[in-house]
Amino acid sequence: MSARAICLLVMPLAAVVVAGLATDPPAAGQEPYREPLRPRVHFTPPQNFMNDPNGLVFYKGEYHLFYQHNPFGREWGHMSWGHAVSTDMLHWKHLPIALGEEDGVMIFSGSVVVDWHNTSGLCAGEDGDRSCLVAVYTGHGHGKQTQNLAYSNDRGRTWTKYANNPVIDLNLENFRDPKAFWDELSRRWVLVTVLAEQHKVRLFGSPDLKRWETLSDFGPAGATGGVWECPDLFPLPVDGNGGDVDINPGAVAGGSGGQYFVGRFDGTRFVNDNPPDQTLWVDYGKDFYATISFSDVPKSDGRRIWMAWISNWLYANDEPTETWRGAQSLPRVLQLRRLPEGIRLVQAPVAEIDGLRTGPEMAITGRATLPPSADIRFEVGRGAGQEAGLRLSNAAGEEITIGVRASGPELFVDRRRSRATAAHEAYAGRHAGPVRWRDERVTVRLLFDRSVVEVFANDGETVITDRVYPSAPLDRIEWLGGKAPEPARASMWELRSVWETR
Ligand code: DQQ
């Protein structure tokens, strides 16, 4: 069985040129990307506040990352779309702001599609073909949220807001986060949105990204303890269709988080394969929100790849980072896997990350020096003890532990002792998710990056993503306890900074 995805689209017409607000360079005397909490491998904005990834799309050799951004401060506000491009989803080049707040309307989350055949009539044919990029975003202002279009005829360098915006206006206060895709079965654009407070995903269809008709609603289902935000719908290989929606608050680790549904999409309606009261969590950490998958990854590649904002609305405005706030996850490849309990989402970091390894593979036997960013593998055998795994620490006595607890069994990340100085009350915590013994062991991959840990157990069957804010760098790594593994079963590579190797 294969799956299919939904697209969202809005319709433009004439235009308002969006002036590119250049991102300011870092302040004088400040070394960019060398601040103690600044990740070396994960994307962060040059300065100021960032939340959701938006408009992920591959076009003419470049991956585009847009993101919710406040150009004027380190807290949420004045939402605009920041912008960066990359050829490998790791080494990013910052570009001017793509879409800015205007006339009291902020630019909330949304998506970008390639309009390959100029169905919208917005493509100028300037690049020797008929295609252009079309963004579908939520306009937030004047007491409501509407869906709007913007387009670019120069590979995303400049954007024009469609003159006949909005393209969908339901006169609602909480109607947002359009994700668009071209549906081959129904031969039309599909748009996935949320009616946030009603816990509903609403699907629309369009021939041209401009005229939208309602197709169907999905929900309420799964977790409904907070608003639904940032939906996505796409096909996944092997077992069926997948869709996800983010919830804030009410997620598995508290505050914001993502849940997903597995089912069938027939071009009009998504039908859940599971009972409506079943909740499937995307990630068991506290910092993985607002996922969005890339549009238009070439068929020859075939991967479904998504990224998420690594934070939580409980403390996003209080992160103790330096001149910037907010990080994006590493891109992850998604698949569905048949497990004993049913068809489940599995996630793996993109293989491009392997190219960042530098130096030899280092066995972790006793206490070792932890590089600022590292790709770490270890295995925990059944019978290794009640809790086994790794401790990352510093001379100040701050530490984070990552491992497997035999009872459950469960994968855990414990950051309760990771920051000696004051932090938001919702920050300290231990986060855990169910894991299973495979051949009497659990395999773990840990991507550590100064203030980020992404942990993948059993090839991505259980995932935990957390920020960590030590007052001094975590520079030591050692086996946590229980029976130490064979040297070859706990090892690491240093990862090169993506900012130094551009
Ligand atoms: N963030 C955006 C909204 C979205 C929320 C506003 C999710 O579009 O619902 O910054 O973090």
Image (tube, helix red, strand yellow):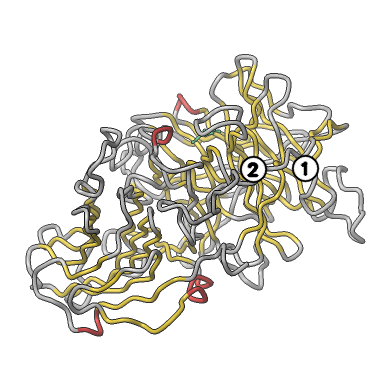
Please give the name of the residue rendered at 76% of the width and 38% of the height, measured from the top-left corner: 150
Nearer the observer: mark 1 or 2; the answer is 2
Question: Where is residue 340 shown, x and y percent of the image?
Answer: 26, 64
Q: Secondary structure at mark 1?
A: loop
Residue pictured at 88% horizontal, 55% vertical: 130
Q: Residue 299: x and y, percent? A: 66, 68
Q: Residue at x 33, y 71 (%)?
A: 376
Drawn side of residue 139 relative to residue 355, left or right: right
Quickly name the residue at label 1.
207
Q: Tell me the CA gap for discs 1 and 2.
A: 29 Å
- Is the CB atom of the residue marked by disc 2 within 8 angstroms of ligand 1's nearest atom? no
Given the image, on which type of amino acid does mark 1 rest? Pro
- Examine the rendered structure and indicate whether residue 53 appears above or below residue 100: below
Q: Which residue carries the number 2 mark?
A: 82
Does residue 482 appear to the left or right of 65 in the view shown?
Answer: left
**Residue at (39, 45) in percent of width and height:** 259
Viewer-side residue, 449 vs 433: 449
Q: Vertically, is 368 above or below 285?
A: below
